[in-house]
Every structure is written in C-alpha cells, then in structure tokens.
Amino acid sequence: MTKMNYTRDNLWQIEEVGFDSRYLGKTESIMALGNGYLGSRSATEERYPTEQRDTFVAGTFNKFAENEVSELPNVPDLWWMDFIINGEHFSLEKGIVSHFSKRLNLKNGELIREFDWAFGTIELHFIFRRFVSKKRRHYLSSFVTIENLTEAAVNIQIRSGIDGQVTNNGSQHFYEGEKGLVDGKYIQMMPQTNESQIDFVFTAGHRIKAENVRERIEMGRRQIFMNYFFDLPAKGTAAIEKRMSIYTSIDNDHSDREVTAIRQRAITEMEALEDISFDELLQESAEKWNEMWQKHPIEIDTENFEDQLAIHFAKYHLHIMTPAHDERMNIGAKGLSGEGYKGHTFWDTEVFMLPYFNFTHPDIAKSLVTYRYLGLDGAHKKATSNGYEGAQYPWEAANPSDGEVTPVWGAADIVTGQSTKIWSGFIEQHITSDVAFGVKQYIDVTGDKEFAEQKAYEILFDTAKFWGSRLEYNAENDYYEIKDVIGPDEYKEHINNNAYTNYTAHWNVTYALALAKELKRSQPELFNHLNEKLGLDAVLDSLAEKVDKIFLPQPTEEGIIPQDDSYLEKKTIDLTKYKSADSVDGLFHDYNLEQVNQMQITKQADVLLLLYLFEGLFPHEMKLKNFEYYEPRTTHDSSLSLSTHAILSADLGKLDESYEFFKKARNIDMGEYMKSSDDGIHAASLGGIWQMIVFGYGGVRMIDGQLRIEPHLPKAWKRLTYGFDYHGESIDVVVTKESVELTKEDNGNNVMFVSNGETYSLKNKLLITLEEV
Ligand code: BGC
C-alpha cells in the first residue's frame, strides 16, 4: 500500500509512505526536481517497468520526424543506478520493504527516499538523497547511503552512469554522439538532437565511500556506466555520491557552441567543485531557494494545514518549471515534469501562471511576455497561412518562431475506433486575445513603460489587426461574427460566436483603438514608428468601423449569456457520475466527442472565465445566474476549471462553495488519487492555487488598469498574510475577518487602489475595517 502523507508538523514536506510500483507516476511528477533550466521526474534510481523516467532541458525542442510536431526531448538519464547485492538484483518488488518513505522538501528542493530492504539473509537500510541545484543551473547531485543491518558482510556491485536509451514514448530524438571517460574520473556522453541539431554534454563523476573498491567502465549502445564492486562489512555503511551536469549548445550563460569546448567547460566546472561537499552544494542551493521563499510569503492561519502546504507546493513547482533564465523559452502545460503536451506552452501561461509572476516576480513575468514578443514571427506565419493579417498566436507554442505546433491527431474515438482529430491548433483562436490580455496585465501590474513602448503595444496592435481580418460580416444581422471556433470549453467544436472568444476579441480591438488614440496624443513619435511597422492607419480605420458591430452574445431573458450560438438549444444529461469521478476521461468511455458536442456539457470554465476576467462588464446578478447555470453543466475535466470557479464563487459571496472548489483544486496533483499526475503536474492549476488565495480570498485584481483589493476569507481561515509587487512597490497585506491591513515602505510614493467603490491611497500603512470592505 502506498499513500500520500501530509502532516501539520511539516508544512514544507510532501511524503509518500509505502511502495507500490503501480503508482510510480504520482511522485515522479509531484516530487519532480528542477530549476527552470532543467526539470526531472523523480523516478527511482533502480528501474521498474511501470516507471516514466524523464529529464528535460527547457527550450531544447526537436522534431523527431517530418510528420511530428516538435517536442521537448527526454534527455539521457543521469539518475539511474543498479545495485546487485550478493549477486541479487535489488528491486523493491522483491523481498520485504519496510519503513518506506519518499519525501520532497519543498523548502530546499531535496528529495529523500529511504527504507529497509530484507531479502533472504540480506538486510539493508537505504537512503537516497538528491537535488537539482538552484544556484548552479547545470548541476544535479545524488547521494546514496547503504547500511548493512546484519552481522554478515554483503557483496555489493553498483552500476551507475548515463543512459541514452530513454525515449519520448518510443521516439528517439538523439543521434548517439561520442561518449567516453575523461581523466579516468568523469564519464561523458555527447548526443545531438536529430533535427534541431542541439548538442548536449552530459557529465557524471562518482565518489565511493567504501573499502577496497574495484571499478570497471562499461559501455553499451547509448550507454556509459561505471561498475563499483566492494564488500560491505557487518553493520557497516557505504555511500556513493554522483555529481552530474548538463550543458547544451543553446545555453545562454556561456558562449561555447562547439561540443569540444562545451565538454571542456563541463569538466573544468566539475573539477572546480571537487572540494565542495554534497551538503555544501545543497546548502548553497537552499540559500537560493530561500531568496525566493522570502519574497511575499503567504501564511494562512487555519486548522486545515493542507491549505498552507498547497501554496508551498504550488510555488515550488511554479519555480522549478519556469525557464526564468531565457526569454526564448516559456512554461509548458506540464512544466518540465512529464511528456504530456510535449513541453508546449498554451494560454495556461497568460491566464493562469503569469498573474503569479506579474505580482510577485516581475522580472520573470517580463521574460515570459518577451517570449510572446519573440513569437510575433511565428504568429505572423500562422495568420498568413490561414489567410489572415497581423499576429495569430499558436494554440500550442514551442520555439517562439515555430508558429503552430499543436499535433493534429489525438486519443482514440470510442465510436469510430480512429484517432480523434485535434482541432485546437486550427480553430481554438482565443489564445490570441489571451496573449494580448496577459501582456496588458503585465504592463498594468508592473508599470513597465519600457516594455510597453518597445514590445507590448506592438503585440496589442498586431493581435487587434488579426481580429480585424478574422471577423466575418453577417449581412442579415449587420454585425461581425466569429464562426467555426473552439472556445475554452473544448467539448464544443466548430461552434459560432463563442462568448469568451467574441468578448475577448472585442476587448482586444477596443483597447488597440483606445491605445492608438492615446499614443497619437501623448507619444506621436512612438505611434508613427508603430504605424510604419504595422501599417496602422489603414488597420485602425477598418477596426473603428467594425468594433461596435462585433457581435457580443447577450443574456437571454433568464440572464444567461449563451456560451455560443447553439449551446442553449442542446440537450442536458445528468453529469453526477462524471463530476464525482477521480479520473477525468470517464465521459469519453461512454460518448465520443461528436456526441458530447451535441450536449450542454462544458469541460471547463468558459462563460464563467469571461465573467471572472472581465468582471467590470457584467453586473453581480448576471454573474450569479450564469454561475448557477453553467457550473452544474461543467465536468471540470480540465485542471484549469476549478480555480476559476473558486474565485468567481468567492466574488459572488458563496464562500462555502468556493472553499469546496478550493480544496478540490489544491488536490489536483497533491491529493490522494494516485494516478492524477502520470503525464506530469498541472501547471495551470498550480498558478490557480496562488490565484485562489491572493485573487480569490485576498481579493486582489487588476481590472482595466485599476488595482482592486476586496478580501473575503473562507470560514476556515482566521487570517491570511500575503504580499505583492505593484509598480515597483512592495505591498504586504494582512487579512482577518475584521480588517485588512496594508503596508508598504514610506518612500513618498502612493499606491492608489479601489475597494468596494471607495478609492484609497496607500502611503505607508492603511487599515480598512470589514464594515468598510
Ligand atoms: C485544456 C486547455 C489547456 C490544455 C493544457 C486542455 O485540457 O482544455 O484549456 O490549455 O489542456 O493545459
């Protein structure tokens, strides 16, 4: 039996107790290690058929074959170690395993696995420790201790090295390249991706703490490893430390582009660390982690300690998955923790993860939005190939210039037995306004004028230009509509006038027109520059003609905003069975997508997301009615759904209901269901955890360039402490049921914000009592 074990005594630890090889995927993902440069699933050192060993280096996309889309290659495995004990292959599937604990320290990123293993007369205690350095981005370290618990010596053979036989579910992305032993000390392997031609250098060095160790190198196809043989005396202890590094020819922290130079660099840098111990390396990495933890810590005073643990868990993952070091890269929907979604970036970034960075790490947020600026070429490519103008962002993105990389074929259709066509890459077009929205939020929250002038405005105009060309005139109704799309609810394909898509496109166009007006007045030079680049004059005239005629689905007599032209006419079915299931694909065991298309079944927040993001456009009563209409029709099959529901219901004063959504949402990966995360963690849901706390209960929102703070705590919380950055100011907030206290350094700057219709100016300290709030 295995299960997750969380305790109120340690709010920085996620632990699995008991071993069961059927559920390896859970902790491989949720205990993944990384530093944004690289990410690695926490697969065990020894191998099991049910494992998924994955390590990725951000941004190293490769297209294995012409008919495939590019994906992040699973790089050669460095963690692997085999133990042969008295001639017996060590495996937890044999013998008796006791006191099994696998735990991740979220505070310093150290993974520990320990247990006793008894097999015949052998009785050993194993401790495996490892981490990926946050200080030295190329570094991974592992330290294994083996203690002999018996009175008889045991013979031990350890095989440890670099294994290039790993694939992405069968697709091998690498040419093997050279491999070898350097200075009798380090083993190296230098594969190259077959299409993107990125060179990789993997280096590993071992140190053994045991008596009379004999060693032998061995090589196999795509493998290089060392064998160590020794006897472990009665009650004795031995240890093996493995230091590993990964470099590539696209790294931006060195200028070496040739394999020979990178190899040399890897060796020199590893040699330079000879005198630093495992614990010292861990310590310096922990200090880097600490810098992050000190920035706007969140404290929740509640009996439900999992809430506090969840925000530690979410922040840990948000940081290990984000390639903050390189603006050519962005966050994958599964971070760097699994092959799911091929490492691709979705709207998940702008709508779910970016807000966390905007408000707490603006420098990282800047890198993420810059990626979209660099993606303009790819977005032009996509628009042109579809016969549109301007920038049409890809639904799934890899390298910024690649354009669309969504695969075309997906899971089996249970009715036809064929692969289902994935239409998102063709018609899930709201991504373009999501990117525009994200960029606008970034400039509003940070006040980064330079980015606005040099990059953001261009994106905002270019995306509006796309919408201008995308709108279709409907002569009968004399309006412009957007037909044949997929909205956020991916269970409705080829629909017309998805409310979310139309409203956000309308916002994008309206904002671009207002911006043009403002720039012409205040920064004519900048306007002229952008005009020359994008041909704005012509575009703006045409947008101005169209904007008031963009069809915005209006509420029915009952106050329901139609999700699209046909949704409300479709039949409904009882969704209880699917809503209460642990796994999310239950619906498709009974129906195919075409059938689901014909029913009022919504995969994830769609209209409700619109009401949350553009709250100013819709009155309270209308939001309430739509919430009550759509939620029962929503399966929450996407991990992007629950957090939106938690926040919106909190806004609507349904705090108990909201808190139930919150608990479900924080459990998407952390929860008890052991198959939840096999393909990788759910990045958007982790951004959602932060949003539920700071936006939902902390009440922070950036609406139309206006900061708003309207906290409301769920019953179970006594007090919430959080902080955020706003226009270069750092603001601390303490919320109780009675009051909200805001503090910032008294530096002469005032921060203006609104709260329930009142405008406040924060100079240093401000206390708002709940009556006022
Ligand atoms: C969701 C999308 C999301 C994608 C990646 C899908 O299941 O429906 O909204 O962008 O997963 O997380």
Image (cartoon, rainbow, N blue to C red):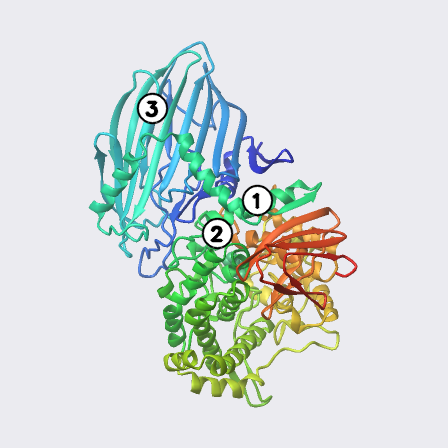
Q: Position of residue 676 (x, y in %)?
A: 55, 46
What is the number of the mark on residue 208?
Answer: 3
Q: Is ligand 1 less than 8 Å from the beta carbon at label 2?
A: yes
x, y percent for residue 383: 41, 75
Amino acid marked by disc 3: Ile
Q: Residue at x 59, y 75 (%)?
A: 503
Tag 2 or tag 3, which sits nearer the N-term? 3
Residue 414 shows up from this direction: no
Q: Is residue 162 visible?
A: yes
Query: What residue sits 58% from the left and 90% below the top?
Result: 476
Which of disc 1 and disc 2 is earlier in sequence?
Answer: 1
The relative height of residue 314 versus residue 152 in the rendered view (above or below) is: below
Give above or below for 150 relative to 70: above
User: Percent position (x, y) of residue 426?
Assistant: 45, 70
For mark 1, give the secondary structure: helix
**Nearer the camera: disc 1 or disc 3:** 1
In the image, 198 versus 737, the foreground residue is 737
The disc, 1 or 3, on the residue closer to the chain's N-terminal end is 3
Left or right, residue 631 beside residue 181: right
Structural distance between the alpha carbons of marks 1 and 3: 35 Å
Q: Nearer the viewer, residue 696 or 520?
A: 520
Image coords of residue 653 (percent x, y): 75, 60
**Quick one: label 1, few (<14), some, or many (20+) residues within 10 Å?**
many
Residue at image mark 1: 312
Q: What numbered label is drawn on residue 334?
A: 2
- Farthest residue, direction front: 748
**Which residue is situated farthest in the top direction here?**
151
